[in-house]
Amino acid sequence: MNTVKNIILTGAVIMLSLTSCSWSLDLDPSTKFDANTVFSSESSVDHYLYGLYAYLKNNVESYNSNAATYTDAYADLLKSGSWNQYGQGYNQVNQQESSFDSNSAGCFECWTGCYTEIRRVNEFIRDLSQTYADRFSASFISTRCAEARFVRDFAYWQLLRVYGRCILRTKVEGPEGNDKPLSSPAECWQFLIDDLKLSAADIPVSAIETGRLDKKAVFGFLSRIALYAEQWQEAVNAADSCKKYGGALLDNYASVFAESNAHNNENLITIDFTKDGVVSHRADVFFRPSGDSKYHGDISVYGELCPTAEMADEYENADSTPFDWDTQNTDPYTGREPRFYASILYNDAPWEGRRIQVYKVDADGNPGEDARQDYRQTSGTTSTPTGYYFRKFITENDTNWETKGSSHFGIHLRYAEVLLNKAEALANLNDLPAAAAPLNEVRARVGLLPRATTDKDEFMKWIRHERMVELAGEGLRYWDLRRWRLAETVLGGALMHGVDVTVNTDGSFTYKRIEVDAGVPRIFHERYYAFAIPLSERTNNNAIDINDNNPEW
């Protein structure tokens, strides 16, 4: 394709938020524009750019809560009650050898989708900066190209976290450019770092208008990319730049996720959805306690994606001591740190004017309305398989979702992650005193005591703990375990756990930690650290040998 021929919008409204505010684009989804129209004015260029931004919406975790791409459900944080219902194959992927093969990354397959977006970005950059450059100012062109490059870099990050390497296509290539070799992992990561630095230079400190990138967002994302690339000083520098341009923690952890407070200096890259149902998702249906159904017009509520005991038990007590089932089994949910209550609904938790009832009773009684159900490798449960529900991305007392779908914003990046990126990078630079400062900043926000050590291995355990609880449900855990090369240990051969609750005759409760994977251990092989390069690419690209696949595929 020599020029951008047209743009077809697949939704009537796309609403995104990547800064402290939001914008909307309202166009007829069947409308087509030729290149002269797209590049006829600054306004029309921006409308096309908004369509590129939509890629971020389509890839935010909460938007995909009813699909098979909520990646924390492949880790040790969330357990699906479904074996294969609702288009969700989480348990099959975790428990079946056949989930991945030598030709495809299975549920993580994203090669074609990423390169489709990369091609669109490359066409946009070429046409704006070359073909139609005489119509716009240099500053207009540089800023819009920087925004587009960020979207391209996000797509490349998705490719690299799945496949470990990819083909770097940085400009529009005709048929003669089809045959191009895979770049090495080091080359790919370096390209991303350099490209993000280039974008950061041209993106303003404050967004041009609502919903556009600003410097702190780009530098925050750069800190993540540098961490994955194991370029520790680059990660530290990017984190410092993110802070310089406005990145900051809110005082209250729960308020970070309040739907009314989506836009702040901690939420660096977020995605807004609309309350009119045009652009919404189904997180309420799949996260809410099953007992909510009768309080919300008997709408179907599946309680489908639920925290594991591995997640729940990781949260410390408010006095900074580790949670201990042996000593706290009679009252496990009192006196826990604030992130526990902001993230998890547990038995007898207050919720929308009632108490969560995750318990069973004797044969003459009725089970709790949110009762835990045993997981089976057929069909699916209709309530939690673990005894917990995930609270973080649902809004208490909201009813709009019943008819309009969920409108709670999704998160791609928070400043808390940036601080933890910096702490981990400094630890790998063997500067543990400096590394403790950003780690303890995250802990201080929730009232936990500071940590200090001269032992790097101990510090890395603290980092892994802090990322697990601070960023739970935000789509990082599975990829963290892979980049640490710990997924084989944490996931391979493991059985996840939950809690079984019995209500006693005096109204008290008895708690028992139980296994919830039906006795079938999870599977994670070394080859899963880099999934198979798609057969279609190896077949159609003459610069790649058909046998040039990732190790063990």
Image (cartoon, rainbow, N blue to C red):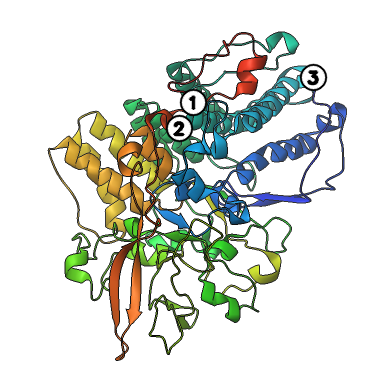
Residue drawn 63% across the image and 52% down it: 22
Q: Are marks 2 and 1 in contact (CB under 8 Å)?
A: yes
Task: Where is residue 334? Give x, y as percent.
Answer: 27, 74
Q: Are marks 3 and 2 in contact (CB under 8 Å)?
A: no
Task: Where is residue 292? Give x, y as percent.
Answer: 55, 76
Residue sitting nearer the eye, 144 or 175: 175
* Residues packed near mark 1 inside 10 Å, few (<14), some (14 to 19) or many (20 plus): some
User: Could you tell which of marks 1 and 3 lies nearer the N-terminus?
Assistant: 3
Residue sitting nearer the eye, 553 or 323: 553
* 481 horizontally vs 456: left or right: right
Task: Where is residue 248? Give x, y as percent.
Answer: 40, 49
Task: Where is residue 469? Give x, y as percent.
Answer: 34, 54
* Residues packed near mark 3 inside 10 Å, few (<14), some (14 to 19) or many (20 plus): few
Residue drawn 65% across the image and 22% down it: 536
Secondary structure of the residue carrying tag 3 is loop
Q: Amino acid at mark 1?
A: Lys
Disc 2 from disc 1: Cα separation: 8 Å
Where is mark 3, residue-wise? Answer: 1
Residue 230 drawn above or below residue 25: above
Q: Are marks 1 and 3 in contact (CB under 8 Å)?
A: no
Q: Amino acid at mark 3?
A: Met
Secondary structure of the residue carrying tag 2 is helix
Residue 316 drawn above or below residue 482: below
Quadrant holding the N terminus: top right
Where is mark 1, residue-wise? Answer: 197
Residue 169 is at least partly visible in this image: no
Disc 3 from disc 2: Cα separation: 31 Å
User: Could you tell which of marks 3 and 2 lies nearer the N-terminus?
Assistant: 3
Residue 31 is at least partly visible in this image: yes
User: Could you tell which of marks 2 and 1 lies nearer the N-terminus?
Assistant: 1
Disc 1 from disc 3: Cα separation: 29 Å
Q: Which dot marks residue 222? A: 2
